[in-house]
Amino acid sequence: MPWSQEPDGPERAATGEEAPGEPETERAEGEGDGAVPMRGADAATLLASLGQAGGPTRGTSPIHVLTVIGQVEGHLILPSKNKTTKYEHVIPQLVAIEQNPEVKGLLILLNTVGGDIEAGLAIAEMIRSLSKPTVSLVLGGGHSIGVPIAVAAGYSLIASTATLTLHPIRLNGMVIGVPQTYEYLDKMQDRVIRFIVENSRIPEGRLRELMFRTGELVRDVGTVLVGREAVEAGLIDEVGGVERAMQVVRERAGLASPAVQGSAGG
Amino acid sequence: MRGVFYTIYPPEVFLDEEGDAFSVLDMSVQGRRLLAAQGPDGALTLERLLSTDPRDYLNPSFQPGTPVPPATDGV
């Protein structure tokens, strides 16, 4: 069994001597009065800002972070020179996040060139069907199957320099030899379009227009949207970064803003 | 069908086996899942931590490039 033996929840955060910066005594956030200097105060401040709620400091962060990077890898193991997000890792992590009562929300960071379409849609469907608040942030790129993953979250953000590429599925080196293959890809295409339309504000006609636009991409069909353009198109909710993304997920998770640490008591 | 790739990368870029420098092991160490790179002498270094708990990423034991301790949970 490759997974951690713990019965519920994602892999637990380090405690005790494995986690430098943790306060040596268990105490709730906000009780620190500055009278006892904390070991590794800077790290502890950062940990607190990630959302250690009041109560025992042991246990896991209330906001978890999933990074989707490189190629989304599905049934086929890609050569190891590729950086990949393996869907068989992501799916159980999402289940664990759904199950663990300590986890209140999920931030999804994307910088992906796309990848296996079914694995990507599986990840997108799982994100969409989590009962806890999810916020996605596209950094760098959210191309191809990265678009459904980004819009699957309850709220999506894009960095101002990040790009989304919308393009048809069939134009990616796949050879269309027989009619069955064409139909299969066409159904996949419709499935992706439907998912994006159902999980964003973009009208279907507009999405199809952008996906099938000719003349914009060199030697290819489709559209590249940069930052704000993705918001204007109705795909992404807001242009923003990590701070804003964390703010949104914490709000939606019902967590208070992190208190200012380290200065109380002088 | 082996899989439909919906990506901006052309298949010859990501499917080509040439240029694979090292083997990558998928393993669990102290309850965290990680990818470890195996050097020519067999030594393992942490390539990537796979955890959704942000606190794990501040743990010095799990920084990329760190030798993977011998007492692992198994591959």
Image (cartoon, grey):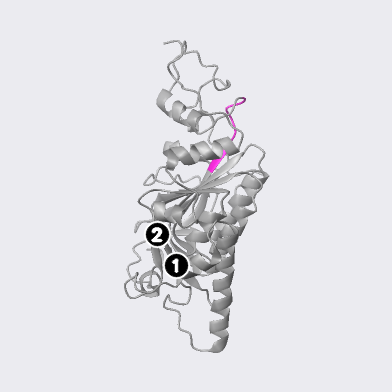
Residue B15 rendering spot, x and y as whole percentages: 41, 72
In the rendered image, the vertical position of residue A143 relative to residue A103, given as above or below: below
Query: Magenta span: helix, strand or loop, mainly?
Result: loop
Quarter that holds the N terminus of chain B: bottom right
Q: How many marks?
A: 2
- Residue found at x 54% / y 83%: A181
Residue type at mark 1 is Leu
- Which residue: 40% across, 42% down? B63
Q: Which mark is residue A225?
A: 2
Letter of the chain that mark 1 sits on in the rendering: A
| Residues at discs 1 and 2 both on one chain | yes
Tell me, for residue A247, which label it has, or none. none
Contact flag, marks 1 and 2 (Cβ < 8 Å): yes
Label 2 is found on which chain of the structure? A
Q: Is residue A114 visible?
A: yes
Q: Quadrant of the rendered structure where residue A118 is? A: bottom right
- Residue at 49% in and 33% down: A18
Disc 1 from disc 2: Cα separation: 9 Å
Residue A138 on image: x %, y %: 44, 51
**Can you identify the residue that label 1 sits on?**
A210
Start-end of magenta stretch: A55-64
Viewer-closest of A103 and A229 = A229
Q: Is residue A132 magenta?
A: no
How far across and how far down the image is residue B74, in percent? 54, 52
